[in-house]
Image (tube, helix red, strand yellow):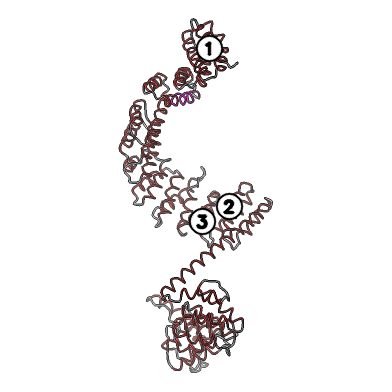
Amino acid sequence: MGRLRTNSQWCQALRGRPSWSFVNPFPLGLALLMWWFLVPAVGQLFGQSEPTHFERQDKLDVPRLVNLLYQRGEPAVQSQAALLLLQRGTEESQEVVRQGLRRWDRPDVFQALASALRWSRDPQYIPQLLQALGCEETTIRQSAIETLARFDYRRVFRPLVALAEDERASGLARQSAIQVLARTQQRAAIVPLMSLLAAEPPAIREAAAGALEELTGLNYGLDMARWQQWWQRHKDLTDEEWLAARNAALQEQVRRLQADLSRAEAHIVQLHQQIYSKIPTADRVAHFQTLVKSEYPGVRVQAILWMVEALPELDSSQQQQVTQLLLHLSEDGVEAVQRQAVLTLEKRLEDPQVVARLLTLLEHGSVGVRAAAARSLGRFRAPHQQPERLVPILAALKKALNDSSLTVVAEATESLGAIGAPQAAVILAELLRHPSEGVRQAAARALEPIADERVLAELWTALNDRSASVRFHILGALGRIGSGASDARKSEIVAQLQSIMLRDGDPGVRSRAATILGELGTPADLPFLWQRCLTTEDERVRGKAWSAIIEILARSGNPELVAQWDQLLTNHRDTARRVELLVEIRSRWQKSETQRPHLDTIQGLLVQAYLAQRRWQAAGPLALDLARRAPNDHELRRRLRWLVAAGYLAVDDKRPEEALSWLQAAEDLLARAGDLAFEFAALRQRAQQAVPK
């Protein structure tokens, strides 16, 4: 209880002792002062706390306990005295308790004794508690109700029923007895309560209906017939079955109330949204200050979201005010609100006060808040002039890697990767051996954009991780390393990628390996990729292997190599891939100054691929354009033959007008066409005959 001695207690302690008037008061006061300070110190020195009145209860007689029980303004002292009186169990102490329960003029005494009886449950005081049910003092009556409800219902059931049915008793006493019957939660109370539905006065009937609703979770009101029908279906239940059914009904009622509360809160949020939309920008900060004091968590969360939206439009002074509001909400008693505020503080990390608050929450917050703090700290970017500000953040995130919650560890892992500090890659690589799959996944995901050759050994080992997600991101990290590595290191990585494509059991991992092989590979790797396209492989892997082939050919800048692969696809009669290859290479080479001179070669191959697919609409204009750029007559005649072939296909498809338009556009080229002029004339005649009359 701590130090309980007040001035009045000192007077009582000294009362009855010899007079001290002859003693010099100064030494006496000095002695008392030394005793007051030295006793606790000595007790603490020897591992003992200061003795109190209640620790020396064997020295407290009943009169002393009575004095403490009736000591106003000291509820803790009164409660202790009440407990000690009940524990004494003597005839004198029992009489004191009975008298105290009759002292309705002292609600504080009654409440102290009633609270003690809830713990001791001594049945000899039930009559006094039953009498208190009729007290007009609300606090006394409510204390009696709560205390009787804690007794063994078998001891209080009959007296309560008798009191509830006693027409001579006061209405308050009867209604209070009905409330206690409901709080016993026993099925035995249902029949007496149902009989009271027909009692007089009406207040008793309403109290009985309310008690039945509390007992059953059903709202049948005063409808006796419905209650009787329900009772006929449930009267044969055992006590255990009754309690199970009642708990289920109460749980359903709680769910309904929670749903109602959620809907009501959502409606309140909607009303606030309507109000917010009408508030001028200049007044919004003041409105935020009102919203953060709302009793509804949903409103406070919505206020946080509005603050994020409004920040870019506010001046520096208003932004600082919003920051202070977010800092205040980061201490909110509702975790959802606190977490949202912590996540939003990532927008204000330039403020040292915000960083300090996040560091504190990362260490001392709840699991959700610690995870949110770790996530927000990962968005910190130290100014070039103040690199030292990053040091405590990295230290805190590294410490969070040992957090008891894997969620926090995962967030701290990703934040270390997001910060991109030089030592972050090494720290994250160590986590690839973590026993938690979620942490390994987070580490691999965070390593992907920052990996370097220092962690290559850990990456080789992680390629055998049982998690496909870990292996997937490790391949991305290898791709990053290979993009800037030497040819020897790149060859080593390419060999690993080929091995992964052959042995890994996950199609997603194999397809990622194919993609990275396309980024790092050379023309020497094309046969391997082509084999993966031809095997009975997963469709995703075949698609990525083919994309890798296109990537390597486009990056090579070698038109002869492209022509070889065009011929290979022609031999395989794979016109779809042939067109896809040539279209993609043409698109890329058009953007490169060094590759543009080779575009005509690629477009010539593309025209032939279009003709093989009977796509004359695409082949004709492209062939005509190539003919106009022909470097010599031999090449001109070659390209005009493509135009003639496209024209015949157009006529066959009932589109002779297209063929005639191409022939007219190429009229000025016929002088150099030689013997092709005869073929042009034959095509024109056929197209004219095919034109509808």
Mark 2 secondary-structure assignment = helix
Amino acid type of the residue tagged 2 in the rendering? Leu
Nearest to N terminus: mark 1 or mark 2: 2
Quadrant hosting residue 518: top left
Task: Determine if the magenta segment contains residue 411.
Answer: no
Residue closest to the eye, 672 or 676: 676
Residue closer to the observer: 351 or 234: 234
Q: Residues within 10 Å of mark 2 (few under 14, many from 20)?
A: some
Q: Which residue is mark 2?
A: 305
Labelled pair 1, 3 in contact (Cβ < 8 Å):
no
Q: Position of residue 179 (x, y in %)?
A: 53, 80
Q: How many marks?
A: 3
Residue at position x 59%, y 78% in the image? 206
Residue 432, image x and y in percent?
35, 47
The crowd level at tag 3 (other Cα within 10 Å; few <14, some 14-19, many 20+) is many
Q: Horizontal placement of 427 versus 175: left or right?
A: left
Q: Which residue is mark 1?
A: 686
Q: Nearer the viewer, mark 1 or mark 2?
A: 1
- Judged left or right of residue 79, residue 405 is left
The image shows residue 41 at horizontal and vertical percentages of 43, 76
Q: Position of residue 444 (x, y in %)?
A: 39, 44
Looking at the rendered structure, the secondary structure element under dot 1 is helix
Q: CA distance from mark 3 to mark 2?
A: 12 Å
Q: Mark 1: give few (<14), some (14-19) or many (20+) Cα within 10 Å.
A: some
Q: Secondary structure at mark 3?
A: helix
Q: Which residues are magenta?
A: 580-590
Dot 3 corresponds to which residue? 339
